[in-house]
Image (tube, helix red, strand yellow):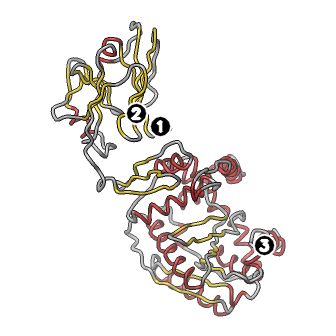
Amino acid sequence: MLKINDVYKKLITEIPKKILEGESKVILGFSGGPDSRLLLDFLISSIKNPNKNIIAAHINYKLRGKESDNDEQLVTKVCKKAKIKLEKFICPISNNSNSIQEKARSIRIKIFKELSLKYKTNKIFLGHNFNDHTETVLLNIIRGSGIRGLEGINKHKIINYGNNSLSIYRPLINLEKKIISDLCKYKKLEYATDSSNRKNIYSRNLLRNKIIPEIEQINPQFLKSVDSLSKIIKKRNSKKKIRFGKYKNLEINTGIEILSQEYKNYNPNSFLDRNHYQMFENILLEKSFSENLPGKIRLFRNGDNLLFENFLKNKRQFKLNKKISIPGKTILIENLQITTRLINKPKKIKQTNKNLIYINEKYYDENLIIRMRNEGDKIHSITNAYTRVKKILSNNKNIQDKKNTFILESQGEILWIVGIKQSISSYVEDKNEKALEIKLLKNPI
């Protein structure tokens, strides 16, 4: 087993000098479990004047009845013996609640903000370990979180709120859970055991208790392989820098974290998934200048600033009836234009995205008009049948502004509900001599 002194010496290299010298107080999230218990012992042995500079914070969610109360009693006993300042909070969460972990996290962050202001420090220490990190990577893969989720839990993270921030440190992130438990036993550190960790009704427990052990039968180094993947992704993402405004020179993940927090401040009852984080990345890396988020919120760039607005409050009915240039570009409204390109002898043309179509030669020699949708509009959607545009829009749940829908038409024939559906009569076939590519560009640079 690793020697305790060797472990602590290695952990010290991860802690800022000002903290070690007692120039900045720290707040420790202290559940009473083995991870936070070892972390408290490490901080007491490493920080100058620990009794003045360490504040332990314990939250009793009342999720495990008497067991939760026993945890609180143990934490009180440990802090009293070590003469460490303890802040205790009782914040009941129902076992029948949806997203228990998300609610608990929200409560923790709120409390850390309050304590940060009270003790004039933004340094928060948490006891996440190597297993927590790799399990998070796997859970993110299962949930389909995208590239960003493959980073797992970061050793250091900044959470911005208003004009303040929390600086989160996780010194134990490279230590395996078993090593932490062994070190606690070696040092005779009393800690609490969470019996709910044995219940596989939670996704993380099922992964930890059943799925990972089965995979380790094939590859005993499985979790280290997961960690290696995580490090590759972190290295890749760290190369992406933002080039404008207050985000300039920040790594993309830091910028995404800032925007996520600002969005949650603007719209507290919101939920973000991987698609929305991708929107944040697009706008921060200048791939787009405007994105529509949950809650009818629009994020857009104004100069070097990024702003949020409720687009329902600011929504207006556009008026448009414009002939498009062939070939060339036609500006429709602010941040929106149509481009067209002639193609001779088209073969095996593929439509690669919803904002790009190809129409056959029958139509492009006529006057092509872009206009707004009208009541009664119909499009040739299936053989020998026309469908009301209104019905198509109603069936598409992803369209937030159904009134301001663009229509491409030729001599009264609707060829395209722009960005949504093309008329089958305008499709290009291999026998056509010519075709017209029509592309809708949002936020063209």
Per the rendering, the mark at residue 1 is: none
Q: What element carries label 1?
A: loop
Q: What element carries label 3?
A: helix
Which quadrant of the structure image shows residue 181?
Answer: bottom right
Which quadrant of the structure image shows residue 91?
Answer: bottom left
The amino acid type of the residue labelled 2 equals Gln
40 sits left or right of 417 in the view: right
- Circles 3, 1 touching at the beta carbon (< 8 Å): no
Circle 2 packing at 10 Å, graded few (<14), some (14-19), many (20+), is some
Mark 2–mark 3 distance (CA, rounded to whole Å): 56 Å
Q: Residue 106, relative to residue 368: is it above or below?
A: below
Visible residue check, residue 216: no
Q: Nearer the N terminus, badge 3 or badge 1?
A: 3
Residue highlighted by disc 2: 337
Q: Residue 49, relative to residue 297: is it above or below?
A: below
Residue beneath the point at 53% across and 86% down:
88
Q: Nearer the N terminus, badge 1 or badge 2?
A: 2
The amino acid type of the residue labelled 3 equals Ile
Considering every residue shown, the one lying at the far left of the view is 376
- Circles 1, 2 touching at the beta carbon (< 8 Å): yes
Residue highlighted by disc 3: 12
Per the rendering, the mark at residue 444 is: 1
The amino acid type of the residue labelled 1 equals Pro
